[in-house]
Amino acid sequence: MTRHPADAALIAAFEASASDLLAYLSRRVGPDDAPDLLGETMVVAWRRVRQLPADGERARMWLFGIARGTLQNHARGERRRWALADRIRLQAQDSAWAPSSDAGGEVRDAIARLEPDLAEVVRLVHWDGFALVEVAELLSIPASTVRGRYQRAREQLRTALSVEAPLA
Amino acid sequence: MIKDQLGDLLDASAPVTRSLDASDVRAMVLAAKVASPKRSRGPRLAVLSGTFALLLAGGAGVATATADWHWGPGLENPERSYVYTSPTWGECEIRFSGFETHNVFTQANVDRIIDEWFATTDVEAAAAPFVDKYLAVLEGAQSDDPGMLSDSRAADLNAWTAHEQALGEALYNELRAHGFDSDSLAGTGSHSQLHCDGENWGGEGGVQ
């Protein structure tokens, strides 16, 4: 089916980022709906495949941007059921998808108690591996806003987790 | 990101992420390609580029859609509706969101033109001259594609794409007649949603 270099590039981009995308989506809509939204992300990506950045990191950002768009369109009861998503869904049920009861639970709880905008920045930085400037791009907000949110989040988390500030 | 004790804690708190099987990802990507018929590039079609909500619910007909079918955000208005008959999915309705121009100076005018067009025009007739053209493009592009040829949904997916594109072209012509060309609508976003009486997005168990 592949006829254009961009097609192969898109397949490669998904092969590289699909797990991360699914994790990103799953954390927001749950493991049951996330595979379908991943499918939607793929459909939209195909429609825009000629816009796929050549650089791998940019391509990852691009896919996350599309995934974020599918999240925004997602609402209760609205989804396309994906046959192939069922396979992924089934695997998720069989594997340790949910966070284990490790030491990170307390931190995740603390993040969850943050204001949603702050928590989103923390998750994108520390869970999804984005730089602050990339978060700004992904969220379509100024980098200064992201930096401010990140600092506020850290201050609140430091207090919540009783982590001392490093010496200057 | 700041590397310190707190940063380390936050890094380590990431939930367990399972690696997807590469073959599953590839199969899903290719299935998505089948479900996303190529849209020809060009100024008219670029106007319509956007996120298309491919939403599925079971069995509710267009006639009862408002009661049983949930339209996505921005698609609640039944006045921006286009109806056609699909090869096997029966009567289908496309709802169009309108254009989000991101320009406070033009948004009201664009909204007014679109609303008036849907309200006063036989939109199916307006789009009809363009449908066959898009169908021909789609079918030609798929003629050597075994994946598409074997897809039982191909005819309905193509019909959807062709009608949606034809609707877009007809609407673009209307906007252009009012002075809005591709340049003036650059960056504009839109989306649409399809619902058919007998839709079957199918594949392997995907029917709902």
Image (tube, coloured by chain):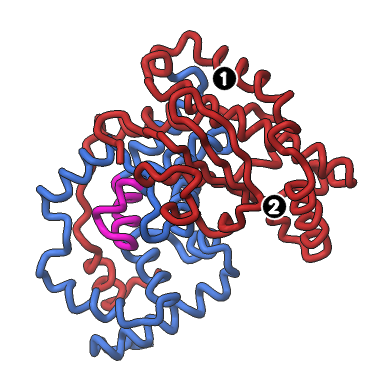
**Residue that mark 1 sits on:** B138
Q: CA distance from mark 1 to mark 2?
A: 25 Å
Q: Give the colour of chain A.
A: blue
**Residue that mark 2 sits on:** B99
Q: Secondary structure at mark 2?
A: loop
Above or below: residue B22 compared with residue A1: below
Residue found at x 38% / y 74%: A119
Question: Label 1 amino acid?
Answer: Leu
Question: Label 2 amino acid?
Answer: Phe
Above or below: residue B162 compared with residue B79: above
Residue nearest the observer in this picture, B123 or A137: B123
Q: Position of residue B193 (x, y in %)?
A: 53, 45
Asked whether residue B188 is drawn in magenta, I would say no
Tell me which segment is drawn in magenta: A19-36
Residue furthest to the top: B144
Q: Position of residue B11 (x, y in %)?
A: 27, 67
Q: Is residue A28 visible?
A: yes
Label 1 environment density (alpha carbons within 10 Å; few <14, some 14–19, many ≥20): many
